[in-house]
Image: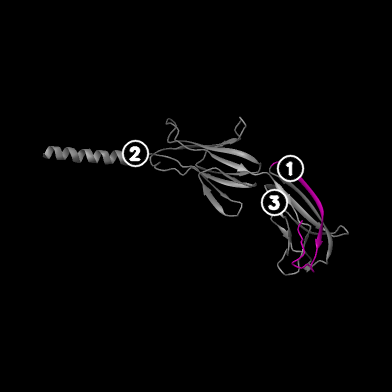
Amino acid sequence: MRIKRIFLLSLTAFLCLTVQAQNSRPGVSPSATYINDDGKETETTSDFAAQAPLSVTFRANPSDMSGYDPIYEWHFQKDGEETEMMVRYEEDTEYTFTESGTFIVTLKAKISAESDELPTNPIKVTVSESKLSFPNAFSPNGDEKNPTFKAKEYQSIVEFHAYIFNRWGQKLYEWTDPAGEWDGTYNGKVVKDGTYFLLVRAKGADGREYNIRKDVNVLTGFTEGNRLNN
């Protein structure tokens, strides 16, 4: 009976050690961290879509690697193309996508040069095509209704420069961020009601070039019933 009890205790200890060893195998769990279209930092291990320029931090997130000399390879490839864009040899890596399309990012990891690759899932990153448009008018009169002139919509714009001119060709304002805006002032004072001129030169992640020229109406006397944006 004592021998049987010792045997059972030994078997139980062996099984516990076996389960513990299985649960503590080296592994990686690749993830991507980026700023989504709502301006919030997001971390995911799944496929995702966002607009350019899209800066992403890819992390290997290794586990139980103590005592090993792991090797990491991040492979970047555009969907539908045979040739890889690049390979990065580091545990964590950062990349900024400035081109539209779908990109496949795959982590190939080993615990040593002689070992087999650890199982991982690729992450697909879809970068949207570009959009850019502006309204025809705004009302910088302090009532918080259309108080500034800015893009009505923009998406995946990687180069941008906008200018505002008066009727005599004098430059009143310029900005280089598609999220930027003009408050309707020049030298600290709100300009007079009237028609001004917008010039925008921009480029999208899809290679599309924008050369926008249009009138901008400043309407400080606008009421809520007016429809400013076409």
In the rendered structure, find residue 208 and report the number of the disc placed on it. 1
Badge 3 vs badge 2, beta-carbon distance below 8 Å: no
Q: Amino acid at mark 2?
A: Gln
Q: Which residues are magenta?
A: 206-230
Provide the residue designation for mark 2: 22
Q: Secondary structure at mark 1?
A: loop
What quarter of the picture does the C terminus occupy? bottom right
* Residue marked by disc 3: 154
Q: Is residue 66 left or right of residue 218?
A: left
Separation of residues labelled 3 and 2 (CA atoms): 50 Å
Q: Is 127 situated above or below 153? A: above
Q: Is residue 224 magenta?
A: yes
Residue at x-position 82% and y-position 51%: 213
Image position of 178 (left or right of 38) = right
Comes first in the chain, label 3 or label 2: 2
How far across and down, in percent of the image, does residue 25 sit? 37, 39
Identified at 57% across, 46% down, the residue is: 56
Question: Of the residues tagged 3 and 2, which is closer to the observer?
Answer: 3
Could you tell whether 90 is left or right of 149 in the image?
left
Residue type, label 3:
Tyr
Residue 212 placement (x, y as % from top left): 79, 50
